[in-house]
């Protein structure tokens, strides 16, 4: 029996452990591996017409740069309500940190 087989077996096991996560990763059919969808969250008091126009123009601009960006619009109320929401979120995050 060859004395090198434990070393070879360990090498094969290492390669399998490193390659299995890449092989097991799921992909959407028809989506290239390099295409990643990004999401931009925008908090605004603006109406639907303004959100539509800005969202469309931003997606077109980012598409020219080769990035697929989805705009997620949030409108919790007016400007004062948005300021209160952000202040409370930052304060809570600071307290948790």
Image (cartoon, rainbow, N blue to C red):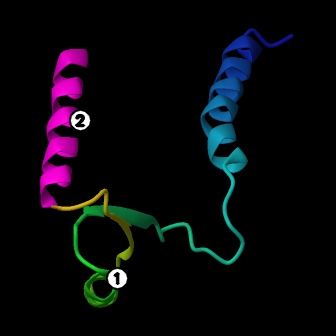
Rendered image quadrant of residue 94 = top left
Q: Residue 89 carries which label?
A: 2
Q: Residue at x 68, y 66 (%)?
A: 28
On residue 48, the disc is 1
Please say if 88 is above or below 60.
above
Which of 71 and 68 lies nearest the eye of the viewer?
Answer: 71
* In the image: residue 44, left or right of residue 15: left
Q: Examine the image and state in which quarter residue 37 appears.
A: bottom left
Q: Give how far across and how far down residue 76 sits, in percent.
A: 31, 56
Q: Residues within 10 Å of mark 2 (few under 14, many from 20)?
A: few
Location of the N terminus by quadrant is top right
User: x%, y% of residue 31?
Assistant: 61, 74
Q: Where is residue 89 in the image (x, y as percent from the top left)?
A: 23, 35
Q: Give SS at disc 1.
A: helix
Let me know if residue 94 is in the magenta part.
yes
In front of the other: label 1 or label 2? Answer: 1
Q: In this view, does 38 lie to the left or right of 95?
A: right
Residue range corresponding to the magenta coloring: 79-97
As measured in the structure, the alpha-carbon distance from the residue carrying label 1 to the one carrying label 2 is 25 Å
Q: Which residue is drawn at 74% across and 9% down?
A: 3
For the question of whether residue 6 can be seen, the reply is yes
């Amino acid at each position: 029996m060859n004395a090198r087989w434990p070393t070879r077996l360990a090498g094969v096991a290492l390669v399998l452990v490193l390659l299995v996560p890449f092989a097991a990763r799921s992909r959407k059919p028809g989506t290239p591996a390099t295409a990643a969808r990004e999401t931009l969250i925008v908090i605004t008091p603006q109406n639907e017409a303004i959100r539509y126009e800005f969202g469309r123009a931003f997606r077109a601009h980012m598409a020219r740069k080769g990035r697929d960006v989805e705009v997620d619009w949030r409108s919790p109320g007016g400007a004062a309500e948005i300021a209160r929401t952000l202040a409370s979120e930052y304060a809570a995050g600071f307290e948790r940190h």
